[in-house]
Image: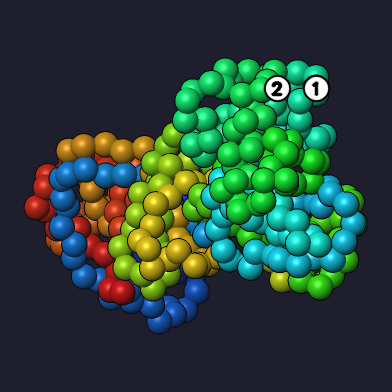
Amino acid sequence: MSGRSRARRVGMAAAVSALGVAAVGAGAAVLGRPHPAAPVAQVSTNTAAVTRGPVAERTRFTGTLGFDGAYQVAHQGEPGIVTAMAEAGTTLARGGIVYAVANHPVRLLYGAVPAYRDLAAGVTNGPDVRELEENLVALGMDPGRQIVVDEKFTAATAAAIRRWQTSWGLPAAQRTGRLPQGSVVFAPGPLRIAQVQAPMGAAAAPGQPVLSATSTNRVVTSEIPVARQSQVHVGDQVQVTVTGLGGPATGTVVRIGRTATAQQSGQQQQGGGNGPLTVTITIQVSLPAVTAELDQAPVAVLITAASKRDVLQVPVVALLPRTGGGYQVRLPDNTLVEVKPGLFDEVTGRIEVTGDLTAGQLVQVPVS
């Protein structure tokens, strides 16, 4: 954090505690002539101890708990009526039935390349064949280890497909050793059904979206100001607290957006103005099973930008502005001690200071 930004942040807090003491004197100085004495607003004070220990510059942001990724599944087979459909909120693993048209199931396989053709003997080499073979092996359909996982469709590939078709309960005549286009859908991993777009009984045509899905990975997304972007890095650990569910969980920043957007408040929307620019960060987090069904739930995100050990600290409200710049604290006997502020923890309200202070001393603070 720059000295200028730190001074601005602590200055706001210090100004609150100094307001009642300094307001009258400042007015006389500006006008430059005596006035009848006005009642002085007295600020009630208490004391707080100077402490020594670790301090972290932590900032709290709001976030949203959800699921990572967004996948659109479109029907690629023959047109027909939807006869089966996975329900919204359910999860599907490799080999699971996503939906069915005219009683022909469409099954999930893992891979990055979408299914775009029939997969059968005689097809040209391609990455979709490699994906298919990887899945057949993972499903246990190559017990003799005859498949060489590559981009070539072989007799061993066809034999593994027939074993898979046998596991579906198909009669021998329908165990063809081929997968027509539209009989499988590839996704990067397990899917969680987010929204059904073609319910049972609806007509499904080639290319028509039938459902949208996400991964099963829990993530939190949070908007942070562009000015804070340099303080957050992929791999950083943060704390995530789900509202109403107790203590925080540790998460890891996995993505930081590159496109800044302007956030709008209600007043700004009415006036047409834009708010501060923010970027989206994505945090991967493991949470208790009780949160499994939560989606788009509000959470608190605590980001640590910097930390130190064994430093003096005081409540930030103990800081008073000094004439000519800088900060000071007031001791119980009204002695003023100049201090230099350092890291500020927004969560605890305490700030690192250096100056002629020792742990255990008391400083004046406004009564809260």
Residue 48 is labelled as none
In-front residue for pair 286/333: 286
Residue 122 is labelled as 1
Q: Can the viewer see residue 306 in this picture? A: yes
Q: Residues within 10 Å of mark 1 (few under 14, many from 20)?
A: few
Q: Residue 90 at x, y = what percent?
A: 57, 63
Where residue 149 sits, quadrant-wise, is top right
Q: In the image, what residue occupies the spot 38% across and 57% down?
A: 287
Q: Is residue 220 left or right of residue 357?
A: right
Residue furthest out toward the front: 172
Q: Position of residue 302 (x, y in %)?
A: 41, 52
Q: Quadrant of the C terminus?
A: bottom left
Residue 72 in view, yes or no: no
Left or right? Give the position of 18 relative to 141: left
Which residue in the structure is indicated by mark 2? 153
User: What amino acid type should be assigned to the residue bearing mark 1?
Assistant: Gly
Closer to the camera in the image, 87 or 364:
87
Residue positioned 35% across, 61% down in the render: 288
Residue drawn at point x = 66 percent, y = 56 percent = 98
Residue type at mark 2: give it: Phe
Q: Nearer the viewer, residue 44 or 206?
A: 206
Q: Nearer the viewer, residue 64 or 42?
A: 64
Q: Disc 2, disc 1: CB below 8 Å?
A: yes
